Image: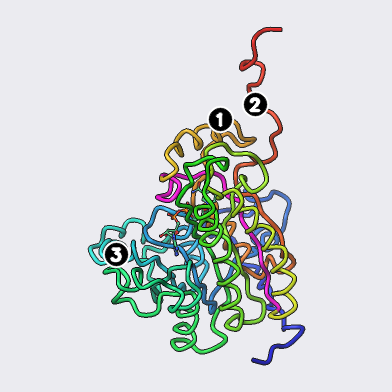
Amino acid sequence: MDRPSHPARVPVEVRAVRARADAPAAALDPGASPDKSAAMLPIDLRGKRALVAGISDDGGFGWAIAKALIEAGATVVVGSWPPALGIFETLMSRGKLDASRTLSDGSKLVFEKVYPLDAEFDALEDAPAEVRENKRYRERGDFSIGGMAKALEADFGAPCLDVVVHSLANGPEVKKPLLETSRRGYLSAVSASAYSFVSLVQRTGPLLRPGASVLNLSYLAAERVVPGYGGGMSSAKAALESDTRALSYEVGRKYGARVNAISAGPYASRAASAIGFIGKVVAWYGASSPLPEALTAEEVGHAAAFLASPLASGITGTVLHVDKGYHAMGLPHDVEAKLPPA
Ligand code: NAD
């Protein structure tokens, strides 16, 4: 497909709106003119379509990111892991997620389409027979990354995507220290959690519209020691962050799109709860971070919406820490209390 080497910029919409009738301008900014005090720089994603890969319930970052993108006006299609997709569909259809589906204007979040996606496979023929014949997979059609990309093109044409979010990870030996991790477990973690991003970008790249934004979710264990985050998952996140930089160059030149990572603080999603002690990690961050409070999924969603928007048109190849500043700390906040008296 022909691509402009210098894609047209998506104009940043800067609207000056009138101050709310019930808020006197002087109260907002004494001394400023009413019009200036009411100027807004909106995140406006109307007319954009996002793919969020990695939603199986309403308890993780993928859901929060999809919701923020929809709040900003985008439509969202989802890639969802077949083993969890049946339960997700049941939760949605029985109204169990209705509270989380409620948007700020009172309407309900709706996904444009949900595709089956197992990000360990680039093409259907890569999946072993035992997976293809498994009861959670066999009725789902082509659940590979390539299959999802083809289905997207068949459904919406090409190009059809403005935002691609990779919000998935899997490491079967995550509870094992690296010293005890098998080759199989390590490679599985890197395959599901890091190469899956490379493959997703390879296959959705031709579907990207100029000015598109690609995003993944990383964790501090990519760059610092986090005991308990084992099984090659720290290695996978390090690869993911390195690939974010390499792909930002390749994708920028080839498709005029941006590639970034959000390194999120801990959050008790289903995936994180599998590690076993996520509650303690959340509490530790809450006590130790420059902003001593728990991170919300909405905060990650809002950062993702910003990175997806034209407001971030100058940002690519970066890892944005959304963790209440924890990554910046060099010593525990209460180091004196922890040490015996000198
Ligand atoms: P989550 O459970 O909401 O998301 C993980 C998703 O990955 C699930 O929907 C799961 O079904 C899907 N998945 C697993 N294997 C898959 C496969 N082979 N193919 C397709 N999908 C698959 O949990 P989350 O914590 O929100 O995780 C989202 C991302 O955020 C992950 O990359 C994770 O590493 C990252 N992250 C999480 C935390 C945290 O503390 N929760 C912190 C930093 C980064």
User: Label 3: few (<14), some or many (≥20) within 10 Å?
Assistant: some
In this figure, which residue is indicated by the disc labeled 1?
A: 287
Choose the circle earlier in sequence order: 2 or 1: 1
**Amino acid type shown at disc 3:** Met
Which secondary structure, mark 1? helix
- The picture places residue 131, in percent across and down from the top left corner, at 35, 69
29 on left or right of 147? right
Task: Tell me which segment is drawn in magenta.
Answer: 256-273
Q: Which mark is residue 110?
A: none
Q: Is residue 332 above or below residue 91?
A: above
In this figure, which residue is indicated by the disc labeled 3?
A: 92
Which quadrant, please, contains the N terminus? Answer: bottom right
- The picture places residue 258, in percent across and down from the top left corner, at 68, 70
Which quadrant, please, contains the C terminus? Answer: top right
Please report the residue visible at 54 percent of the width from the left and 53 percent of the height from the top. 183
Give the Cα distance between marks 3 and 2. Answer: 42 Å
Choose the circle earlier in sequence order: 1 or 3: 3
In this figure, which residue is indicated by the disc labeled 2?
A: 333
User: Label 1: few (<14), some or many (≥20) within 10 Å?
Assistant: some
- Tell me, yes or no, whether the highlighted magenta stretch contains residue 161: no
Callouts 2 and 1 close, C-beta under 8 Å: yes
Give the Cα distance between marks 1 and 3. Answer: 35 Å
